């Protein structure tokens, strides 16, 4: 009895520590190596830097045009996120409180949309955007970001709004409030917790998105950080110092973001599979 | 009557705009994709119908099958690796078998928040000749010439990628399971403990049945996610060397955007969709069988 409990404990600590090492080790190595010049990284990969060599950061920021990419990433992570969450809330309200026959059908269409991968539509989407003339524009990135985030976010919002008691809405209707007023003044304030979760979750996935920006854009001025960093992997730079600095620039914001919103983010990941 | 009319109008104001956007970006292109896949369009000029020629060409291509094999290995590592491991990790945290559980939870979940492209380049560096892994092995084995050669082996090249995938996404499942485990009423577990149930009995008879639905949903996530895997591999190896680490999504991307075989690429896309629908269907049949066995 006691023996098996101890075995569990030993096993548990073993996997937990192993995972922690696998996470901390690479990130720590990346961070301190980014302060070493290329030659020092190649010569002794494990050694700590002899000083703070910040040249890597200055050069990779300038050469890699990371400033532009960073700005674009901020745009792509915020603008579509705000629109997605608003759309998901309005759809969720329509589907859960109006009880129309069409709401089941439409909700079903969105749920099927969960299965559609970016890859299966990227070719026609690219052609479509070229035809309308929004290829290689920020708008051409923002619209698909919203569309691909909608199914999951509508799934979250609909189940949450369903849980809001009907009596709140009915009282307001009797007082003569319009449906849109109810949406803005009752549903949205009451749903703040799920809105927070949805926002953080969408922000994160938009920030890390890669294939849409890669295929739908070719102009540096509108590309995002992951695509910018990817160019450090190829022929553009064989300078490891520059590459490491670029990787730190790409990683640090999300780690800070994670430390701030850890709880909400975990909620977002688990909300979708919750058993009622 | 008037009341009803305002209700309908309000409904469409709320649900209409997102729907139009969604249908035009997803539904319309999917139908379009089906049509292009039956042609040999090269991105410009007129469509020329070739029927199922693209599909036939794909199933005769050895590169496609190597990609499919790699995809299925990713599905396997996700379903048989990430899901059980994620469950075990969540269980350890839930039962508070280790101390400092918040710290461990953070460490396991953290990789999820980092962009797959960054992760790919980072691990590529770790395995490179002046990388962290290579240097440590050189020190331990006292062999200063050690290099990672696994990428040059056609059938094994995918293994380091499988490892990174396992490390990167297990935390996601762990968090999902943990949130659901926390919904189990503690009094049930206390009662079982008082009755003298062992750790494995509690796990098998209380926790496992409770979590069955959640495990099913995450398995579907794992399958669709695995077939989509693109970013990480594209940035890590680009499918190379010599297509050794190719997956279907990369095969699609190369054919479409490098060789301008739009029709061929669309056919590959359709196959990806069919595969994920097929696998999910298979899974549902299996779980129904399993259900019947239990009851």
Image: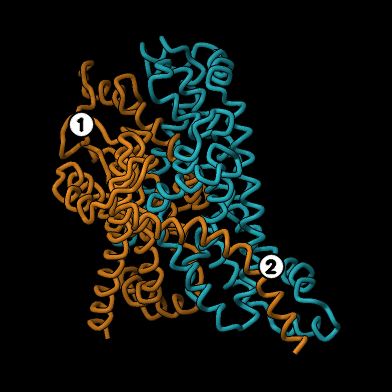
Chain colours: A cyan, B orange
Instruction: Identify the image quadrant of the N terminus of chain B.
Output: bottom right
**Residue A80 in sight here:** yes
Eyeballing the image, is A141 above or below B212?
above
Query: Which quadrant would the C terminus of chain B be assigned to in this image?
Result: bottom left
Q: A131 or A191, which is in the foreground?
A: A131
In 3D space, how far apart are the residues under numbered discs 1 and 2 (Cα atoms)? Answer: 52 Å
The crowd level at tag 2 (other Cα within 10 Å; few <14, some 14-19, many 20+) is: some
Crowdedness near tag 1: few (<14), some (14–19) or many (≥20) residues, C-alpha within 10 Å = few
Q: Position of residue A190 (x, y in %)?
A: 72, 69
- Of A215 and B194, the residue lying toward us: A215
The secondary structure type at the circle numbered 1 is loop
**Is B265 left or right of A191, judged from the image as shown?**
left
Residue B116 image position (x, y, % from top left)? 43, 40
Q: Residue at x 61, y 52 (%)?
A: A200
Vertical arrangement, residue B125 with respect to residue A176, above or below: above
Q: Give the letter of the chain under mark 2.
A: A
**Residue at image mark 2:** A191
Residue at image coords 21%, 21%? B146
A136, above or below B214, in the image = above
- Indicate which disc residue B242 carries: 1
Between A128 and A216, the residue placed more toward the observer is A128
Q: Residue at x 57, y 26 (%)?
A: A66
């Amino acid at each position: 009895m006691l023996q098996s409990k101890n075995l569990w404990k030993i096993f548990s600590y073993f996997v937990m520590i192993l995972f922690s090492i696998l996470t901390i080790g690479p990130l720590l190595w990346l961070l301190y190596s980014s302060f070493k010049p290329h030659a020092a990284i190649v010569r002794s990969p494990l050694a700590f830097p002899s000083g703070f060599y910040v040249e890597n950061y200055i050069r990779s920021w300038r050469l890699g045009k990371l400033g532009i990419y960073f700005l674009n990433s901020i745009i792509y992570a915020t603008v579509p996120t705000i629109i997605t969450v608003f759309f998901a809330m309005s759809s969720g309200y329509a589907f859960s409180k109006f009880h129309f026959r069409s709401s089941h059908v439409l909700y079903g269409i969105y749920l099927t949309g969960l299965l559609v991968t970016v890859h299966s539509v990227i070719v026609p989407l690219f052609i479509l955007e070229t035809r309308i003339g929004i290829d290689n524009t920020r708008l051409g990135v923002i619209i698909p970001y919203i569309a691909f985030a909608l199914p999951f976010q509508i799934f979250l919002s609909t189940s949450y709004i369903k849980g809001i008691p009907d009596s709140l809405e009915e009282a307001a209707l009797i007082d003569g409030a319009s449906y849109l007023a109810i949406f803005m003044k009752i549903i949205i304030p009451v749903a703040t917790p799920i809105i927070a979760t949805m926002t953080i979750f969408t922000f994160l996935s938009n920030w890390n998105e890669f294939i849409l920006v890669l295929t739908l854009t070719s102009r540096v001025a509108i590309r995002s950080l992951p695509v910018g960093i990817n160019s450090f992997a190829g022929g553009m730079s064989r300078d490891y110092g520059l590459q490491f600095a670029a990787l730190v620039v790409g990683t640090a914001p999300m780690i800070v973001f994670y430390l701030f919103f850890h709880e909400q983010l975990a909620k977002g990941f688990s909300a979708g599979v919750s058993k009622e | 009557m008037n009341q009803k009319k305002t209700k309908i109008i309000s409904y469409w104001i709320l649900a209409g705009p997102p729907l139009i956007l969604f249908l035009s970006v997803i539904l319309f292109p999917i139908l379009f994709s089906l049509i292009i896949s039956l042609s040999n369009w090269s991105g410009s000029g007129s469509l020329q119908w070739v029927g199922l020629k693209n599909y036939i060409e794909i199933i005769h291509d050895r590169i496609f099958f190597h990609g499919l094999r790699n995809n299925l290995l990713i599905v396997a590592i996700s379903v048989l690796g990430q899901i059980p491991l994620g469950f075990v990790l969540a269980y350890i945290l839930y039962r508070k078998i280790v101390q400092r559980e918040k710290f461990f939870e953070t460490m396991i979940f953290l990789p999820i928040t980092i962009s797959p492209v960054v992760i790919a380049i980072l691990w590529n560096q770790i395995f490179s000749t002046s990388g962290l892994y290579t240097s440590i092995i050189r020190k331990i084995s006292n062999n200063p010439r050690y290099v990672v050669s696994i990428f040059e082996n056609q059938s094994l090249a995918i293994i380091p990628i499988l490892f990174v995938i396992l490390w990167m996404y297990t935390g996601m499942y762990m968090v999902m399971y943990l949130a659901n485990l926390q919904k189990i009423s503690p009094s049930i577990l206390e009662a079982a403990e008082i009755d003298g149930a062992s750790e494995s009995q509690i796990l098998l008879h209380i926790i496992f049945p409770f979590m069955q639905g959640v495990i099913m949903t995450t398995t579907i996530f794992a399958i669709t996610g695995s077939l989509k895997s693109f970013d990480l591999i594209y940035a890590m190896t680009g499918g190379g060397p010599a297509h050794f680490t190719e997956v279907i999504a990369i095969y699609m991307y190369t054919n479409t955007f490098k060789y301008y075989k739009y029709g061929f690429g669309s056919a590959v896309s359709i196959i990806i969709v069919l595969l994920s629908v097929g696998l999910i269907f298979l899974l549902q049949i299996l779980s129904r069988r399993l259900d019947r066995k239990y009851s």
